[in-house]
Amino acid sequence: MAQSAVTYDSVMKELQERQFKPIYYLMGDESYYIDKISDWIAQNVLQPEEQDFNQTVMFGSDVNASQIVDTCKRYPMMAERQVVIVKEAQNIKNTEPLEKYFHQPMPSTVLVMCHKNGKIDGRKQGLVKAIKENGVLFESMKLKERDLPAFIQQYLKAKNASIDPKSTQMIADAIGADLSRLTSELDKVLLGLPEQDRRVTPQVVEDQIGVSKDYNAFELRDAIVNRNILKANQIIKYFDENPKAGGLYALLPLVFNYFQNLMLAHYCPQKGSQEALAGWLDMKSPWGARDYLTGMKNYSGMKVMQIIGKIREIDAKSKGLDNPNTPAGELMRELIFFIFH
C-alpha cells in the first residue's frame, strides 16, 4: 500500500494529537514550514518546567554528528521524553553516526533536524529509508506564485479576517513567495484592523504595506486585460518616477504570466465557459478566469504569440543584450505600446 504524502498539515495534525515520533527531519527551500514545525515542537512537546533539563538546541556548524547522537541517547530527567533540536543541520559534515542512530533511535527522544535551503543527498537512500521507517521526513517546498492568493486568504481566515481578490493580488505581487516575509506583513496588517471591521481592503493594503491601491501590478494587469491604454501608461509612469514602489522590470513576469496563460486559454475546448476555462488553466477559483475570457476577446491568438515574443525581447534588453543604455521606463513604454497596437 502506497505511503501517504507527508505534508505540513499532516505533520501538525499528528503533533497536535501528541503522536510524537523519535525523528523529524525537516528539509527544503521554504524555511517557513520548517520553522513552524520546529517552533511548535519546542514550545509544546514538554511542559515549561521540563524544558530546562530536557530541551537542547544545537547548531550544525558548532557540533558534529557524534555529539548530536550522544545527546539523543541521554535519558530524560523527571520527564517522559527529551527534545533535541538541531538547527542548520545542512552544515553537518560527516553524518555516518547519525545514520546509525536513525536506524535505532531512542524512543524517549524527539530529535528535530532543520535542514534548510536544500535536502538530503539523493544517493543516501539508506538514510532516507531509516528516517521514513522510524520518524518523519518532511520536504518544505517553495509555494508557487499561483498558490499565493489562496495561502493569503486562508492565513487571514484563520485569524478571523477577510480579504477581497484585488487586495489579495496586490499583496501577492508586492511581497512574493517568501512566506516568512509574507506572513510578517500579513500580521502587521492584522494588527492595524479594528475589532469591529476585520476586512482587508485595497486602502488597508496601501496604508499598512505601502502598495498604492491605484498604481500597482494588479491594476496594470487589469488595464492590459481591458485595453485601457491611458491607465496602463499612467501606471508605468508612476513606477518609473517612484523607484521605491518596485522596479519596473518586476512587472515583466506578471505580464508574461498573463499572456502565457492567455495563449493556453485560446486552446481551451470550452473557452466560453468560465468554470471550464478555470479548470483548463488549473486555477484555484473560477473568479480569475474572467480576465482570460475578456483577454480572448481583446487579443487574438496570433497577437498573443507576438506579445510573448516582444516580452522576451524586452526582458533580454533589460539585461543589456543589444541595449547599451535604454532606460527601464522607455523599454516598458515600448512594450505597452506594442501590446495595444
Image (spheres, helix red, strand yellow):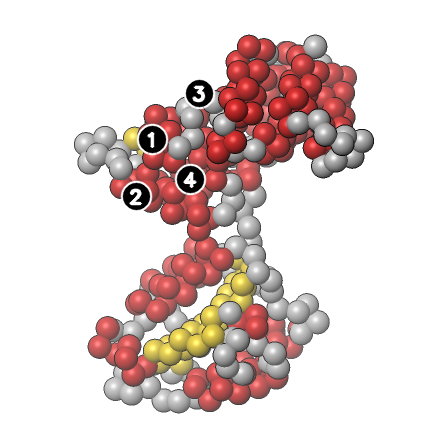
Assess disc 1: are there few (<14), some (14-19) or many (≥20) residues with their C-alpha within 10 Å of its C-alpha: some
Q: Amino acid at mark 2?
A: Lys
Assess disc 3: are there few (<14), some (14-19) or many (≥20) residues with their C-alpha within 10 Å of its C-alpha: some
Q: Earlier in the sequence, mark 1 or mark 4?
A: 4
Q: Amino acid at mark 4?
A: Ile
Measure the C-alpha gap from mark 1 to mark 4. 18 Å
Q: How many marks?
A: 4
Q: Secondary structure at mark 4?
A: helix
When the figure is inspected, residue 187 is found, relative to residue 136, above or below; the finding is above
Q: Which residue is mark 4?
A: 152
Is residue 226 among the parts visible in the rendering? no
Q: Earlier in the sequence, mark 2 or mark 3?
A: 2
Q: Secondary structure at mark 3?
A: loop
Is residue 329 among the parts visible in the rendering? yes
When the figure is inspected, residue 95 is found, relative to residue 248, above or below; the finding is below
Q: Quadrant of residue 79?
A: bottom left
Q: Position of residue 204 (x, y in %)?
A: 33, 30
Q: Which residue is mark 3?
A: 214
Q: Position of residue 261 (x, y in %)?
A: 65, 28
Q: Residue at x 66, y 69 (%)?
A: 121
Measure the C-alpha gap from mark 3 to mark 4. 21 Å
Q: Which residue is mark 2?
A: 159
Q: Earlier in the sequence, mark 3 or mark 4?
A: 4
Q: Nearer the viewer, mark 1 or mark 4?
A: 1
Q: Quadrant of residue 17?
A: bottom left
Quadrant location of the C terminus? top right
Q: Quadrant of residue 278?
A: top right
Tag 1 and tag 2, C-beta contact below 8 Å: no
Q: Could you say which is closer to the camera, residue 341 or residue 41? A: 341
Q: Which residue is mark 1?
A: 207
Q: Amino acid at mark 1?
A: Asp
